[in-house]
Amino acid sequence: MGIEEFIQNNDPQKRSGRKSKMLPYLDNILRLRNLGFSQKQICMYLETEEGVKVTQAALSQFLAIHADDPSSEETSEAPTKEK
């Protein structure tokens, strides 16, 4: 079976509809990263300031997916905190 036949006989799998809990904070995460903050420090920021607990591994994967995506920069808005 060649690639053309495979494409005709199969549909590509779609990504799950889940969105990362870090996505609303993408601009803040990228800003911290661009200022030289470590992933550990960014995780600490997310937990202490935004109430979002994530592992460094999850943050690393998130950055690998979103850091170079120009459509996701400047379009995400962090939710405002309610006191």
Image (cartoon, rainbow, N blue to C red):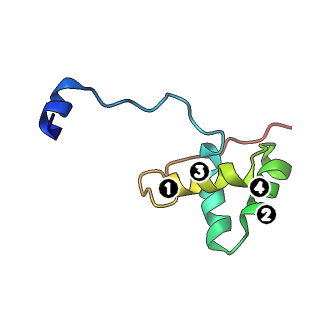
Residue of label 4: 43
Among numbered discs 4 and 3, the one appearing first in the sequence: 4
Among numbered discs 1 and 4, the one appearing first in the sequence: 4
* Alpha-carbon span between mark 2 and mark 1: 20 Å
Residue of label 2: 41
Residue 2 screen position, x and y as percent: 14, 38
Q: Which mark is residue 73?
A: 1
Q: Residues within 10 Å of mark 3 (few under 14, many from 20)?
A: some
Asked if the residue at tag 1 contacts the one at tag 2, i.e. Cβ–Cβ closer than 8 Å, the answer is: no
Q: Secondary structure at mark 3?
A: helix
Residue 5 appears left or right of 65: left
Among numbered discs 2 and 1, the one appearing first in the sequence: 2
Q: Residue at x 66, y 74 (%)?
A: 35
In the depicted view, which residue is nearer to us: 17 or 13? 13
In the depicted view, which residue is nearer to us: 35 or 53? 53
| Amino acid tagged 3 | Phe
Residue 33 appears left or right of 52: left
* Alpha-carbon span between mark 4 and mark 2: 5 Å
* Alpha-carbon span between mark 1 and mark 4: 19 Å
Please state, as top left, top right, bottom left or bottom right, where the N terminus lies in the image. Answer: top left
**Vertical placement of residue 63 versus 3, above or below:** below
Q: Residue at x 77, y 43 (%)?
A: 52
Asked if the residue at tag 3 contacts the one at tag 4, i.e. Cβ–Cβ closer than 8 Å, the answer is: no
Residue of label 3: 62
Q: Nearer the viewer, mark 1 or mark 4?
A: 4
